[in-house]
Amino acid sequence: MSVVSKESIIAAKDGNVEKLEEILSLFYQLGMDTVVFMGLPPYEWEDARQSGIIRVAAAIKRYDSSRSMKPINYLFMALKAGINSYLRGLNFQKNKIMSGALRLDSAIDGDTVKQTTWMEIIKDPNVNVFESVAHNLDFESFYHDLKLSLSPLERKVLDLRYQGIQPRDICSALNLRQKTEDNAWWRIRKKAASLKHKVAI
């Protein structure tokens, strides 16, 4: 029996753990091929693949043998849907941060320099927002470079802040005192400011 056939999917759906593991293992590898092909940075590969595998498992549970679509195509569509869902969530978080938390040092009127927020840029009718983002902030590269410069604790704090989690909840999740979290965030801001991107959190 093929790893991905109507019979194998039905067997997995009915509780055959061995068949389920075979199918998920195959799509876990296909997930790696997919995220590499899509151009995702290496530090996003695992989370994207996990999102895809969750969708594959859900698709197996919903499988209807009367479908005319080939079984492997049906599950591959679920895999891609999960990865795309992860990417949409990632982009939402980036846009959320850029709209309110990130600021650019923009030189205007010769020597005059002011802090310009992304919300101000978006509201400017003379500015193409997408070009502004592309030209002024390579966010993916910046975020990756910043994380490389951080300690394990600082990376955890940054990841949780990046997800929009409040400091008090971060302290609870990581079992930290508020002062410890504050100090970690101060160090993150300081390191961010020193990067060549000139972006301050």
Image: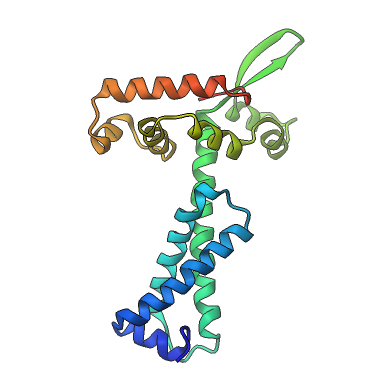
The residue that appears at 67% across and 19% down in the rendered structure is 106
Q: Is residue 161 left or right of residue 68?
A: left
Q: Is residue 48 left or right of residue 114?
A: left
The residue that appears at 70% across and 8% down in the rendered structure is 112
By what rule are the colours in the image chosen?
A: rainbow
Give the quadrant of residue 18: bottom left
The residue that appears at 68% across and 36% down in the rendered structure is 129
Judged from this view, the residue extending furthest toward the top is 111
Q: Is residue 198 left or right of residue 30?
A: right
- Image location (x, y in percent) of residue 201: 50, 25
Q: Is residue 179 above or below residue 23?
A: above
- Image location (x, y in percent) of residue 154: 39, 30
Residue 17 seen in this snapshot: yes
Give the quadrant of residue 77: bottom right
- Image location (x, y in percent) of residue 110: 77, 10
Give the quadrant of residue 177: top left
The residue that appears at 29% across and 23% down in the rendered structure is 180
Q: In front: 199, or 115? A: 199
Figure disc tally: 0
